[in-house]
Amino acid sequence: MSQTLTAGDESPQKPRNSQAQQGSSVPIRADSPEALLAIVPHLLGFMPEASLVVIGTEPPCGGVKVTLRYDLPDPSGAGIAADIAAHAIGVLGSQEITAMVAVAYGPEALADLVAAAVRDAGREAGIDLQEFLRVEGGRYWSYFCGEEECCPAAGLPIDPHLHTQASAMAAVEEKVLPDRAAVAARVAPLGGIAAESMRQATRRAERHVTQLLAKARKSGRLGAVRHLIASEGLATVSAMITTYRAGGRYTADYQLARMTVALRDLRVRDDAWARMDPAHRDSHRRLWIDVTRHAQPGYVAAPAALLGFVAWQCGDGALANVALDRALADDPRYSMALLLRQVITAGAPPSLARLPMTPEEVAASYDDAEGSYDGAEGEDGAGHDHEMDSGVHDLDSDDEL
């Protein structure tokens, strides 16, 4: 079962492009079957297939409060249908939402049990299910209407482009992608010559750190070199964030490789996390997409987890989930990614994607920790491994790889 939170806890939903930062917004309402089918792809960012979409709405106008997407279970079963319904109703109930609409994308044999489960769970929880549609083959049916005149057995044709809300949302939002696979492709690793070039650049960045460590062992000044390595990483992160906020981007492999290696230091990763001001969320999303795509195996978890956080800030639940998929594929125990996956799956709205600490607080927490650091160091062919005590700082307790 997968769930994607794609709308915030405010209505109207903030558009996903830079116009949102300038105060532009589009009222989003699911107040008719046509409106509902028109807005779902824009809420998700892609055209759903084999999916259940549950939208919490605000009476009396049907304003969208939260959108959840689940894989439509195949094969269908009463147990899994009840689990999906319980999760969806639990999320809506936790946000005190009292009305909802839903759409199942797929054949009747797969949708019927889920539709019944959502209806029953909503009734028990006192959440009014105002509409439930099923979409298949370019046509739709309503579980609420059996009148042949208005809801024929053959279904009704879908033409969402004719609805005014679809046109308004298309004018201010990013392009709707054809499917969820296209969302995953946005953060897919490089291939071919580009991947080989990035691999070589990453080895160069690793050697730089290894050489500093070798000098430290000879001089006996390990603490000073550790501080130098962290300082270089912090400067790299700060410069990259500044560049992307100004509309630029990094294209040199070695620049990107240094970033991925630097992020293995939790002090650097946590500093980057603390700088993810939502006022610049679109620039940050672009930044972490670039870094995640270029990151080599063993270096993906940190930038992908940061991308997951920023995508959540943007209300881009689909991107958040595919980013976390990449982070956990790289390191199944990466606690920042596990935490974000838990929070997003629980239906926490983007308004809760707050910065856990300021950069100054991060620096202070690590400075305080250095006095109790036992001085142990390790090399795994990928640079220095800073193992911080889990109680030292509040951001995360990941051990570096």
Image (spheres, helix red, strand yellow):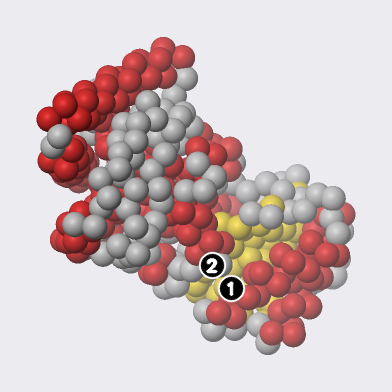
Choose top left, top right, bottom left or bottom right for residue 103. Answer: bottom right
Q: Kindly state the secondary structure of the residue where label 1 is placed.
A: helix
Instruction: Name which residue lies at 84% across and 55% down.
Output: 76
The percent coordinates of residue 196 (x first, y second) are 40, 15
Task: Name the side, left or right, on which 353 lies relative to 191.
Answer: left
- Decide which of 6, 322 is in the foreground and name it: 322
Please report contact status of discs 1 and 2: CB closer than 8 Å, yes or no. Answer: yes
The percent coordinates of residue 359 (x first, y second) are 19, 58
The percent coordinates of residue 113 (x first, y second) are 84, 64
What label sits on residue 324 in the rendered view?
none
Task: Name the side, left or right, on which 73 lies relative to 97.
Answer: right
- Decide which of 241, 303 is in the foreground and name it: 303
Asked whether the viewer can see residue 122, the reply is yes
Q: What residue did someone put label 2 on? A: 347
Choose top left, top right, bottom left or bottom right for residue 263. Answer: top left
Instruction: Name which residue lies at 70% across and 72% down.
Output: 86
- Please name the amino acid that badge 2 sits on: Gly
- Please name the amino acid that badge 1 sits on: Val
- Decide which of 8, 257 is in the foreground and name it: 257
Task: Name the side, left or right, on which 26 lies relative to 23.
Answer: right
Q: Quadrant of the N terminus?
A: bottom right
Label 1 vs 2, first from the N-terminus: 1
Local packing at callout 1 (Cα closer than 10 Å; few below 14, some 14-19, many 20+) is many
The percent coordinates of residue 161 (x first, y second) are 55, 50
